[in-house]
Amino acid sequence: MRIAGRLAASTVAAGVVAMMILTAAPAARAASLASVGGAAHAGSAASAKAARPVGVRAPWAELADEATGQDLWSRSSVTERPMGSIAKVMTAYVVIEAGHLNRVITVPDGIIGYDDAYDASTAGLVPGEKLTALQLLYALLLPSGCDAAYTLASAYGHGHPAEFIAQMNAMVRRLRLSKTHFSDFSGLPDPTEYSTYSTARDLVSLGRDAMRLPVFREIVRTRTYRLAATQNHRAHVWTNVNPLLGQFAGAIGIKTGFTTAAGDCLLFAAERAGRELIGVVLDSSSSPVGLGAAASDAATMLDWGFGRQPAAGG
């Protein structure tokens, strides 16, 4: 499984992603992409007024109003599915809720074996480096660093990553995510491809809770984070692999995901004219297109959602 390669490819395929979004629904995309121009097409009004978003590939998906949680459209949204690195949203949530984000944490030796076992995506951390928990959250959420996830889980699990996973599942119960379970803090297939799972509905609910944490919200909307070298750590530059940021007008987060079983997944949010929508797509594509398919699905859903009139009182 080449998890790292999938994520690396997503950063160089921004142009492909933009093209896929334009191709999926030309009329809506032309108005939505901040970096892509183009004339409006005649079908845009009809697309916005459709009873559902047209052309979404993902078998499991949901779009909701962030403020109310109202389900605007969904597809098989209560079916349990793996979600890949979207699991890192819960990892970040547990860390932020625990606090002490200025604490200095030493990157442990264990990251090497953990990352190598799954050829996992990393933030380029080196054992012995010392970074704050806040810096590690950027390493976790922007490049989807499994090395950062392991480091945080070890530190906040008091030296025992398994203890941190127990904290994640305790938070699952606290947030009433009734069809969610974590067996790994990165969403990697440990011990199996399906041992970490959730539903589209639970993930939208988790996303809503996470986006209400100011620190989390600021991190996931950041496109690039630069960390200068010090005596404690090397220089790092972390780029957000979320394909919507900088491509879809109003995109504000939040997290990508991929494993062989999960396919290409995207938990996403955007805001326009004071209204915020949040959604998720699971297994949009497992083809070489990669996250482009998930980004296209997300853009289709968002354009459709913003094109509808909010429900009365909602």
Image (cartoon, rainbow, N blue to C red):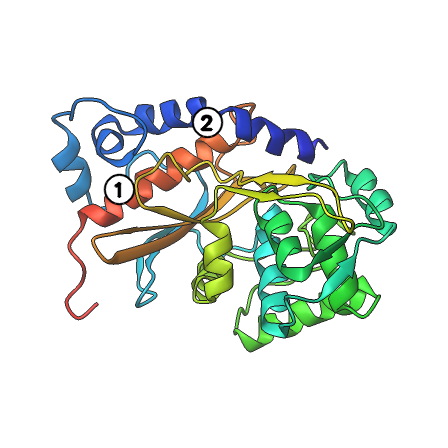
Query: How busy is the neighbourhood of tag 2: few (under 14 within 10 Å), some, or many (20 plus)?
Result: many
Q: Is residue 225 left or right of residue 118?
A: left
Q: Residue at x 71, y 51 (%)?
A: 148
- The residue under label 2 is 14
How far across and down, in percent of the image, does residue 242 sit? 49, 40
Gap in angstroms between the C-alphas marked 2 and 1? 19 Å
Q: What number is the disc on residue 90?
A: none
- The residue under label 1 is 303
Which quadrant of the figure contains the N terminus? top right
For this rendering, which residue is in front, 50 or 6? Answer: 6
Q: Is residue 152 left or right of residue 47?
A: right
SS of the residue at dot 1? helix
Q: Residue at x 80, y 50 (%)?
A: 129
SS of the residue at dot 2? helix
For this rendering, which residue is in front, 299 or 250? Answer: 250
How far across and down, in percent of the image, does residue 23 sit? 32, 23
Of the residues shown, which amino acid type is indicated by label 2?
Ala
